[in-house]
Amino acid sequence: MSSQPRSQSTPVMAQKLKLKNCALIRIQNIKVYVQLLQEFEKGIAAQGVAIGAREMVQNTDTDFSSISTKIAFSDVDCVFIASYAAQGAGIVTKLRQAGLDSKVTVMGLNIFSSPEFVDIAGPAAEGVHFYGEWIPGGFDDSSRAFAQRFEADTGAAPDSWAAVGYSIMRVLIEALAKSGPQPTRDDLRKALDGTTDVPVRIGFGRYSLMDDRRPVYGTYVLKIENGSYVAVKN
């Protein structure tokens, strides 16, 4: 676990998992996935991890046979997937089917912290690692209560985006309460800058800001174990 922002958690994960040579797979036609992969690559490069392969997919792709076979027969010891949960599950499944060595660490984005990922990938999800701020089902009484209410209201268990979105609104409500009876946009912005130690349902349960205005709430290195999400201990 790490109390650092996500951008600083990648080197921690590289050290924890003793990575040496990674293959990278990303969606190429959605900017945020390009940026997130670049962030990950920068983080592991700082730890001396080599890049063994770079592969790209479109967000609508469903056939990953070619890249999976190529990676499965390479000498990488890790694979990082920058994709959304459903597609990432498809990639992981095809990598396993292509014969990827079970010793190779498969990793992904925080959006893999979604019941959809495990539901689609099934046994292929076993052992997948990623950094994330949400543990499906919750990590304490308040986050578990949130998960139960969300599922009762929507019929689906919350994923990472649902937990993050709820937590962001909690921060906004706190800032609005401090902004006065008729706040302007500037009033709200100033209040947001001064809003810290807010109870949230992600990370370690408290939201604050660093000096450079980056939010910090705690990030986990998570692993799928027996179909459940568990935090990797230090």
Image (cartoon, grey):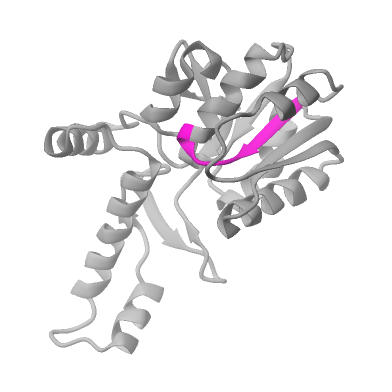
First to last magenta residue range:
77-86
Q: Residue 77: in sight, yes or no?
A: no
Looking at the image, is 207 positioned above or below residue 219?
Answer: below
Does the segment drawn in magenta span residue 73?
no
Task: Report the number of numbered marks.
Answer: 0
Q: Quadrant of the N terminus?
A: top right
Q: In the picture, residue 117 is in which quadrant?
A: top left
Looking at the image, is 34 positioned above or below residue 138?
Answer: below
Q: In the picture, residue 19 is in which quadrant?
A: top right
Q: Position of residue 224 (x, y in %)?
A: 50, 20
* Side of 205 relative to 129 (left or right): left
Residue in the image at 27% along x and 32% along y:
157
* Side of 120 relative to 25 (left or right): left
Residue in the image at 58% along x and 17% along y:
127
Residue in the image at 78% along x and 25% along y:
71
Looking at the image, is 76 positioned above or below residue 14?
Answer: above
Q: Residue 180: in sight, yes or no?
A: yes
